[in-house]
Image (cartoon, grey):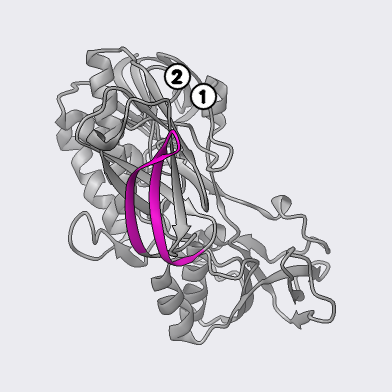
Amino acid sequence: MKAELVVIGGGPAGMGAALEAKRLGLEDVLIIEREQFPGGILQQCIHSGFGLHLFGEELTGVEYAQRFIDQLGPAGVRLLTDTMVMEVAPGLVRALSPAGLIEIQAGAIILAMGCRERTRGALNIPGTRPAGIYTAGTAQRLINVEGYLPGRRAVILGSGDIGLIMARRLTLEGADVLAVAELMPWSGGLARNIAQCLEDFAIPLYLSHTLVEIHGKKRLRGVTLAQVDEEFQPRPGSQRYFPCDTLLLSVGLVPENELSRQLGIELDPVSGGPRVDQTLSTSVPGVFACGNVVHVHDLADNVTLESRRAAAGAVAWLARPVRGRELAVGPGENVSYVVPQRLSLPVSGTVSFLFRVRKPRQEAVIEVVSGGRVIWRKRRRGALPAEMVEIKVPTADIPAADSLTIHCRGEK
């Protein structure tokens, strides 16, 4: 089997990239999706809040996904579902389908595998291992897709957006959410989710708190939370017991990059995703990446917009597979990571940089520095670790240097 472009993953990133590649003139575009239906995680997101930026209206995750699913057939995008990619090499994809092992010769590849949740095993939580402990996404699937309520009295560890949304979802289904505990002194979720999912339902949020013990043998019967100090160690005497039968973990998402490692792609140690240039090209020629496999996004709309850039990059590379000189881009003061991590020269127009801050800033000055000189500066009201920051820098301001560094300094 052959394809000009193979897209691995049929979520919002994969579908957006495939449709854009067809719009740009590619004749043979193939999506490989391991689930029975395309749509990715959006298939279990029945809450609204999707599509505001892209469609100018508020959609559920399922409705948002369906907008793109409906376009695949008419656009001529080939789709293989129930198919798991087992091996990837430059120009070659091997996958296991219901028909057996298939081999696909690919002109270019776009990685769009999304991300996965961190589990209890990544947290080293002390205590027993009873039933009743779920990741927030697993609980979401149980309720929204399978029709099961995980429990009646719940505590949520972590204030990521999925956890906040599940606090509201459990409450609407009749469960009692006793607490949401967050290790950091600030929330890990969007401000709108704090307001709509916790404050509107009087669900308490305990900042600078963590889980110190799990209680129960066969079934969870309670958890103990404690306040933490500046070193994130439990404060003596601050422990508080919550009787509950359900614990949801919303402690971060990790880009799904096993295939990227297999390809030998260079990964960013902070974001966990491939290091890419402004076209979303990875360190392996002809392989591009987009969406949550690169870094975890706040909004599905932004995932789709990014996927279109990856498709444009892949189409351009297929027409002219060359690489020029590169300029490194890195994080500076109060910046955890930056995407893209490099620029392939020459560039024209403007370049969008996405980054997250390490600590909140009520007033901030964002600076792009090259060779010790500030080449671009902008003031910003508010910068939070939970919210992605985007800046657009005119390429006329970018010198012919070897590197750029992006800082988010406090207003003086």
359 or 70, nearer to the observer? 359
Residue at the (46%, 80%) spot, across then down: 172
Q: Main SS type for the magenta part? A: strand
User: How far across and down, in percent of the image, does residue 322 sit?
Assistant: 31, 12
Kindly indicate the quadrant of the structure image that contains residue 28. top left
Position of residue 355 relative to residue 73, above or below, is below
Q: Does residue 101 show up magenta in the picture?
A: no
Q: Name the residue carrying label 1.
A: 265
**Which comes sooner in the sequence, label 2 or label 1?**
1
Q: Nearer the viewer, residue 225 or 166?
A: 225
| x and y percentages locating residue 137 in the rendered image | 53, 58
Q: Which span of residues is magenta-colored? A: 360-380
Type of the residue with mark 1: Ile
Find numbered disc 1 in the image and state the secondary structure of the residue it sits on: loop
Please name the residue shown 34% across and 15% down the image: 323
Q: Is residue 373 magenta?
A: yes
Q: Secondary structure at mark 2?
A: loop
Name the one closer to the observer, 341 or 224. 341
Vertical relation: 320 (above or below) 238: above
Query: The disc labelled 2 sits on which kind of residue?
Result: Val
Q: Is residue 40 visible?
A: no
**Residue 265 vertical placement versus 197 (above, below):** above
- For image coordinates 39% across by 49% down, the residue present is 367
Q: Residue at x 57, y 26 (%)?
A: 261
